[in-house]
Image (cartoon, coloured by chain):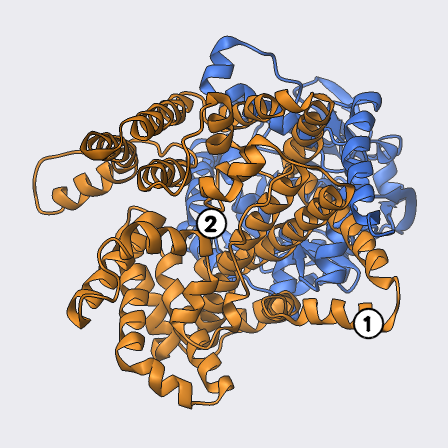
Amino acid sequence: MVFSSIPFLYFFLPAALLVYFVAPSGAKNAVLLFFSLIFYFFGEQAYIVIMLLQITAAYFSARAIEKLRGKRAKLIMIISVGACISSLLFFKYTDFFIESVGALGLPISPLGLALPMGISFFTFQTVSYVIDVYRGDACAQKNFVSFACYVSMFPQLVAGPIVRYGDIEKSLCRRTFSAEGICGGAFRFAVGLLKKVILADRLYEFCRAYLSSNDTSVVFAWAYAAAFLLYVYFDFSGYSDMAIGLGKMFGFDFPENFNYPLISGSVSEFWRRWHITLGTWFRDYVYIPLGGNRRGAARHIFNLAVVWLLTGLWHGAAVTFVLWGAYFGALVIIEKLFFLRVLKRAPRPIRHVYLVVAAVVGFVFFGAGSAGEALGTISQMFGSAPLISRETVYYIQSYGLVLSLAALGATKLPKILFSKIAKRVHGAVPVLKAALTAAVVVVSTAYFVDGSFSPFLYFRF
Amino acid sequence: MKKAAGVLFFIIIFSFPILFFVSRRGEVSLSERRYLAPAPQISLDGVISGAYFDELCAYLTDNAPFRDALRTVKALTEMRALGIKENNSLAYERGHVAKIIGKINDASIKNALAVWKKVDETCLNNCSKKYIAIIPDKGYFFSRDLGYPGEDRRCAIEKVTRALADFEYVDVLDKISLDDYYKTDTHISQNRAMGLVGALCEKMSAPKSHSDHKVLSAGEFFGVYRGQSALPLPPDELKYIESDALALCTVYDCAAKKYIPMYDTSAARGRDGYEMFLGGARGILKITNPALGSGREIVVFRDSFGSAVCPLLCERYDSVTAIDLRYTDVDTVVQNVNFGGKDVLFLYSFHTLENSFQMK
């Protein structure tokens, strides 16, 4: 079940909110856990066991770590983290590994494993929790229901943000509700719907048009690459907005996951603004434990390379994701070595153009089905196709407004507009927000309904 | 006022399920001409496999209250507000809705050729002359004249004419224009098909017709593309041609073994107004013109486009046997149709050529 669907928006969410707010304070975590398990079971029947096993293992490990301390605690931490990571490695990377080995000519077949929904997210949450308890940065949660509620909480279960235990530790035990908070959450959810349903899904249509076209061109390839980057941004940040909004409705403050990454002036800055909770997770649990930048230049480069290799692999078990991670890792390393100093002397627009071009090219790897496909697109971008084509003209005319709105929407312009209106017209912003929310929800519903449409011309004859 | 956005949000999401449960749910979407997903039956197997949840999602989505109005909201958002030129692969231009044609479906053309060759080998040994004509979709004109995408369909025609080398090809591409089609439907309006019929008859050396035609109206007509596009378009007018000769013609349905009207104006007010021509979906029909006595007869293998064309051919031939291979098979054709000395015309649209797997 995805947030942007009729079953979620009009049946699951109202039912969950109704029962949640009717339930007494002491039962709210249990209610949230119950609905989260239903949410998960709706999309993933058998693999719910994997999530429950991880929750149980992390819960008891953390309790034991807190009780024992010392070397035995370290051993338990290693076993617990190892078990969680192993399940992620097994389900996500076994077939990738087998296929890679098979490519060398060994007679070995993939297992055909399906990836449990949200495993990359809930594994990182349980791992960070156990490590935080071991480090003494967090206290072990004594209430199993509360802990299970933290890991499985449906707003952030499937696609993040990666909520660290410390982020919501207090809220798990005691949270306050306000009409402003709940209504603010609703507006944030509507913003997420706008990004996902009205922008991201339209951008995806444009991308599909390019991928299925026999009439591509240099301009079409660049437009595709830019549209794909914007699609990933609006899709993912839209989902994060919906998750954060839902969190607010249920009384939680989840961390922000995106901070206008496309206005950055360098790749390093871009990654501080893009998927922030993943970046900080790798920083705190991989990069800094490896020594960060404190053990000399060579070790610094090595640490960055490890982080970017893992970042690529975390996004998916495929060569394209490894290349994607390697590409951005290489740019970050080059920037750290010398290029940032050069960039800082350049005017802001130049830095911004550099970042946009680097990101647009890099995300071609993210969207490609194979390394060959990615290189094919990049070669078209740099001249292996005609400059323009008939289909290029058609699709850019057709999606020109969507592309322009998306490009402007990825900047701070909408926020600046809202604040200017707020300054000039007293009371206009709440009215605008209300109108926007109603319009977005109705239009999104229209998209959900027509998404079920499939042409059936032969009904007639 | 600060909470207005949230209040509106919650009013909408709590009202919708109430409306869902109190509103009547139908089995069919008339505008889309398809069945809606039924309420799923719960079972342990279905729950464990997840099939139940997929069916439940389809049911809740398909049966949303205000479904048609919401589809129109989406179409208007897509095409008017966002400026996207197509919705559900349908484009709107110059008052016409048309399906974007895209790439040529080679697999379907191969299948169509296999079926037609089987017909040729099985049935057409003692016929007179063999002809083939391909009627373009509206999407062809959108691609050719209005800048819409689409592989050149003349390549598909070349494949067909190469494969059916002993058929004479009748080129009708330039005999038809976009304005000859209904604005909201796939088909050509019968009163605008005279150019097409003239080209066919000229190539087949059919006798000239001296009938005085009267163009009559069967009322308003919402074509298939109106519902699929969900755009709030005005209706077309369903027109048909009458003449003294046509009034004397009889139409016999070989499968149902009964005579049917050539034009059933009561069907014009039904689910699909175009079914008024030759009774809609029928396998083998024999149209007889008792007044002509030309000694010429023709067998037309056709799709729905032929429903409006075959009556006009009957003004030039003593009989027209109209065969739709989507509703009958070659064995049945062999048993019911005598091809001896008759002209044979394969009259198909691009649409059937590229969706040929329904032909038997």
Q: Which residue is rendered at x = 23% and y = 38% of the image?
A: A95
The spot of residue A66 in percent (x, y) is: 33, 30
Residue sitting nearer the eye, A15 or B324 = A15
- Indicate the secondary structure of the residue bearing disc 2: loop
* Residue plotted at (30% across, 38% down): A92
**Residue at the top extreme of this rendering:** B44
Q: Position of residue B98 (x, y in %)?
A: 68, 55
The residue under the point 67% across, 62% down is B85
Image coordinates of residue B116 in percent, x first then y, are: 47, 39
Residue A328, image quadrant? bottom left
Q: Chain of mark 2?
A: B
* Residue type beneath disc 1: Lys
Count of labels shown?
2
The residue lying at 31 percent from left, 82 percent from top is A339
| Residue A411 position (above or below residue B110) | below
- Name the quadrant containing residue B238: top right
From the rendered image, report the letter of the chain displayed in orange. Answer: A
- Residue A228 seen in the figure: yes
The amino acid type, in three-letter code, at marker 2 is Asn
State the residue position of label 1.
Answer: A423
The image's mark for residue B105 is 2
| Colour of chain B in the rendered structure image | blue
